[in-house]
Image (spheres, rainbow, N blue to C red):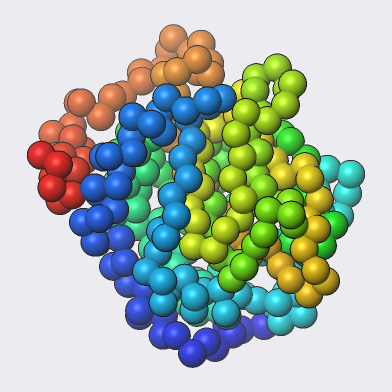
Amino acid sequence: MTSISTDAPATSVMGVFDDSRYAQLAVESADAYQSADPFPHGVYDDFLPTDLAAALSTSFPAPDSMAWISRDNAQNRRLYQHDETLMPALHRAMLREFNSRQFVLFLETLTGIDNLIPDPYFIGGGLHLSGRDDFLKVHADFNWHHKLQAHRRVNALMYLSDEWYEEWAGAVEFWDKDMTGPVDMAYPNFNRLVVFSTSENSNHGQPRHNMCPEGTYRKVINLYYYTTHRDDEDAEARPHFTLYKTGASDFATQLGADFRRSGGQL
């Protein structure tokens, strides 16, 4: 199956994160993100230009319009596809922008995690679609990417359903370390970006089944980001490896400084 044509040209996506408002948002939101309970996370509404978000929503593949991978077990029920060659051109272009330098710099500034690496394979990510009665039980994500040989550090979820109501449930929930219950949650509202840092204790999921009407879908673009080292509480004891720091590279530190400056904060 080849890419599905859409009314919106893929070129309309190119450079979307060059806008200085993203650098400003990252700088202004960094403290709240990094201190959030039960683990670092943030929710950002009206994230994409409205016309672009609407085009992505309208052309989001239906269950019968693209070859989907189906998950249907006790832990997870939904459709997803991480093979970009099967996706509409507009969504394929959007995935590329979420893997761009500008968006990675946005995430680094927001999360405080340097040296993030986007996933060109979109393993486990890409487009996700769920309908009535679908769910995802609370879990901590896989933490290692065998192709990249890197540790998973950040998830970004871009919600694109054109309408969603709280009575339909379907919120992503953030649970405490002891799994006693959710501390925070975010509903899949249109044009909402949810970002959170991943660790052994970043328990999250969508345990309440979707209660949306038949034929209405929870549309999400899932992106995951990695680093080749960890120097936090989840780091493995490997004394024979050197944990290189961003501060060792003038180029790396200058990239971040230039990005933050573009938001008018320096």
Which residue is nearer to you in this view: 19 or 209? 209
**Where the C terminus falls, by quadrant?**
top left
* Screen quadrant of the N terminus: bottom right
Asked which quadrant contains residue 142, the reply is: top right
- Number of numbered markers: 0
- Residue 65 appears at what percent x and percent y? 71, 82
Left or right, 208 with respect to 223, comes to: right
Locate residue 166 relative to residue 228 in the image: left or right: right
Snapshot quadrant of residue 71: bottom right
Name above or below for residue 194 compared with residue 250.
below
Question: At 74% from the left edge and 61% from the top edge, which residue is drawn?
Answer: 130
Q: Decide which of 238, 144 is in the foreground and name it.
A: 144
Left or right? Give the position of 131 relative to 7. Answer: right
Residue depicted at x 13% and y 34% = 250
Which residue is painted at 25% across and 55% down in the image? 21
Q: Position of residue 260 (x, y in %)?
A: 19, 43
What's the residue at 37%, 69% (across, down)?
Answer: 49
Residue most toward the right? 74
- Would you say residue 118 is visible in this rendering? yes
In the figure, 64 relative to 40: above or below? below
Front in this rendered view, residue 62 or 164: 164
Q: Is residue 143 visible?
A: no
Q: Could you tell me residue 4's position as x and y percent?
A: 59, 85
In this view, 220 is above or below 196: below
Q: Residue 248: give x, y in percent of width and height.
A: 19, 26
